[in-house]
Image (tube, rainbow, N blue to C red):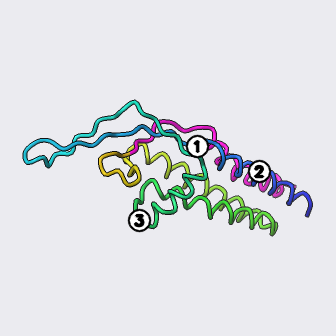
Amino acid sequence: MTNRVIFIGLSLFLYGIALSLPALAFKIVEITFGGQNNKVEIATLTDKIITMTGAELTLVGFFGLLLLVIPPSIGWLANPAYWTSCVFFFRQQYNWSILTALISIIVVFLGTISAFWFRLPAGSIPFQKLALHELLLGFWLWLAAPGFIMLVSIFKLKK
């Protein structure tokens, strides 16, 4: 019992650090309209960079799902999958813990990587969007949290 609590505690510690650190860096894309009747959208990538912490992304991702900004916001669904893997780990259901942790890693990676191709809304500013520029330390620590649970579950199954 104490080993499981320690391992879950370490994983949640990684998760907590990931939420507090900058996770993603975005470049601001200025949107202007031109062409015939000003109906053509012209996007200009600026040098302004905005970083967001894991906690901000968790909140924004949840609201992104509610507002159906689907491709990048799907990465938010990795959070419940990670929490579920912790519950399965605590219950000693290691096969399910491995599966849900793996799903969590795949979903967050694919959801976040899709933001390289999809521009995200920049809050309430209609003429700006965000383009993913860089994956920062918080993102990699977030990936480490379910990865740690998955590795420990694999070792527990081998015993």
Find the distance from the CA under tag 2 to the CA under tag 1.
16 Å
Amino acid type of the residue that numbered disc 3 sits on in the rendered structure: Leu
Q: Nearer the viewer, residue 15 or 145?
A: 15
SS majority, magenta: helix
Which labelled disc corresponds to residue 67? 3
Mark identifier at residue 13: 2
Regarding mark 2 in the picture, which secondary structure is present there?
helix
Answer whether labels 3 and 1 touch (C-beta < 8 Å).
Answer: no
Q: Position of residue 50 (x, y in %)?
A: 48, 39
How far from the left and from the top, in percent, is residue 49? Answer: 46, 35
Q: Residue at x 12, y 46 (%)?
A: 38
Question: In the picture provided, is 129 more to the left or to the right than 79?
Answer: left
* Badge 2 or badge 1: first in the primary sequence: 2
**Residue 125 percent coordinates (x, y):** 35, 50
- In the image, the segment drawn in magenta is 130-159
Instruction: Give the mark nearest the N terminus, 3 or 1.
Output: 1
Q: Residue at x 54, y 52 (%)?
A: 57
Q: Quadrant of the C terminus?
A: bottom right
How dense is the environment of label 1, judged by Cα within 10 Å: few (below 14), some, or many (20 and up)? many
* Residue highlighted by disc 1: 23
